Image: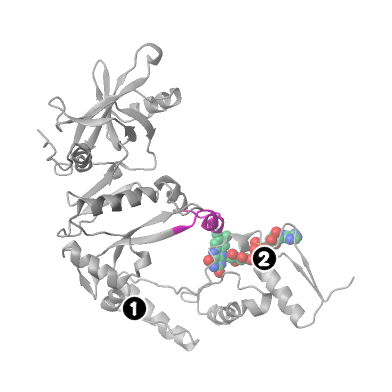
Amino acid sequence: MIFDVAIIGGGLPGCSAALHLRQRHASVVLLERRRCGSQASGVNYGGVRQQGRHEAELPLARRSRQIWARLRDLVGDDCEFLVTGHLKLARGDEQAHELERYATMARLHGLALDLLNRGQLQNRYPYLDGEAIAFDASGRPHPFQITMRRFGRRLKVEEMRGSLPIRAFFFDCLRFDALSIADRPARERFQALAEAVPAALQIPRLVTSSEAAASAFYEAALAAGHEGLMAKSLDSPYEAGNRGASWLKIKRAHTLDLVVLAAEWGHGRRTGRLSNLHLGAREPASGEYVMLGKTFKGLTDAMLEWQTKELLARETHRDQWTVYVRPELVVEIAFSDLQASSRYPGGLALRLARVKRYRDDKRVADADTMETVRSVYAVTLPGALAAPPQASK
Ligand SMILES: Cc1cc2nc3c(=O)[nH]c(=O)nc-3n(C[C@H](O)[C@H](O)[C@H](O)COP(=O)(O)OP(=O)(O)OC[C@H]3O[C@@H](n4cnc5c(N)ncnc54)[C@H](O)[C@@H]3O)c2cc1C
């Protein structure tokens, strides 16, 4: 057969060229050695942007943008094309001038760009704090480490978007109407959040002094598959990166993510391996680690092997039995109780502690602190909310 045009390669440009040639009644053969769209055209970030394009590319980008808007007419499907906008931030005057120059040039090509000053930007995009949660098919949240699979990903982004959908939820508002409100009490920030963000994007919240209502809210959170609740003081300012005493994590499962401070050499079958772990949590006020107990339970042979290597690489000093290490490894510990203790410096000791797993998805800054340990102790006491013991340091 004789064709007017032969196209080699079924990426977007090849397929698009074939489509438009056919529309102009040319006979076309498209030769693809694998599958159409399986190479660069099928793995890209999907950005159909115009802003930032080189001046020479802009006329093409403008034209193609109009074609993308007509996709359904052209190919019978909108190909999930979504117009979301594109924000470029200038970090300093020089970059701001550069963007102004660009906007003037782009206007000549019919691309109208909004230039926002600092106040306008903050008005339009109030600073929010929130988190992303991935849900399973039944609508229950996935554990954190599964959610983390979506972050920093460059490959198979689209595939993961389908298999691990993620949603953003906001719980704080730090800037509103061009004003920083980070120092304002939480009750005011929550009000600003309610104005800035639709209810469906806000973390569910209950303000109550009723213990029964609070318990029912907590039970509902657990029933929905969440780990627990954060209890926050309505009077507290926002403290970046420091949750402090005005933010308490309330979770039922007696597990804590603790930091390994040292390990003792094992005996018998474990001879030559570092086994009994010294566990601690950071005291936010002093920044020091406070030891809460020891355990060698729950460690498999593979974990013993791994931790011996990792701990020796972090050794600071040792004595006859124990290797002391830099506090860098986070480990999830299950335990039966926290009990008051005069032996340990934080006044609290873990009972029947057992290693569940190493949290290689967590940094030590994300491990549970003594604040959390004390709050867990408080809520596990009969009558709850009894004053937890203070550190004796
Ligand atoms: C990670 C990534 C992110 C990107 N993000 C963006 C973005 O956000 N916005 C944007 O505009 N662009 C983006 N791009 C660029 C864009 O995807 C490519 O410029 C575009 O898809 C190139 O299309 P193409 O048809 O030239 O190549 P391809 O899509 O790779 O198609 C070439 C086709 O030719 C076939 N082929 C090769 N040799 C032969 C042969 N001898 N016989 C038969 N068939 C053959 C291949 O199998 C392939 O299917 C991105 C690219 C990548 C890799």
Residue identified by numbered label 1: 97
Q: Does the residue tagged 2 have its C-beta within 8 Å of any atom of ligand 1?
A: yes
Q: How is the image coloured?
A: one colour
Q: Residues within 10 Å of mark 2 (few under 14, many from 20)?
A: some
Position of residue 337 relative to residue 24, above or below, is above
Q: Nearer the viewer, residue 104 or 66?
A: 66
Q: Residue 390, percent across and down?
A: 11, 37
Magenta span includes 164: yes
Instruction: Judge whether 315 appears above or below 70 on screen.
Output: above
The quadrant of the image that shows the C terminus is top left
Q: Nearer the viewer, mark 1 or mark 2?
A: 2
Q: State the residue in front, 227 or 281.
A: 227
Q: Residue furthest front?
A: 212
Q: Which residue is mark 2?
A: 11
Residue lying furthest right: 1
Real-space Cα separation, disc 1 to disc 2, in angstroms: 37 Å
Q: Which image quarter holds the N terminus?
A: bottom right
* The stretch drawn in magenta includes residue 293: no
Q: Is residue 351 left or right of residue 30?
A: left
> Is 6 placed left or right of 155 in the picture?
right
Viewer can see residue 243 = no
Front residue of 236/207: it is 207
In-front residue for pair 313/361: 361
**Which region is colored magenta?**
153-166
Question: Which structural element holds mark 1?
Answer: helix
Question: Which class describes the residues within 10 Å of circle 1: few (<14), some (14-19), or many (20+)?
Answer: few
Q: Quadrant of residue 392?
A: top left
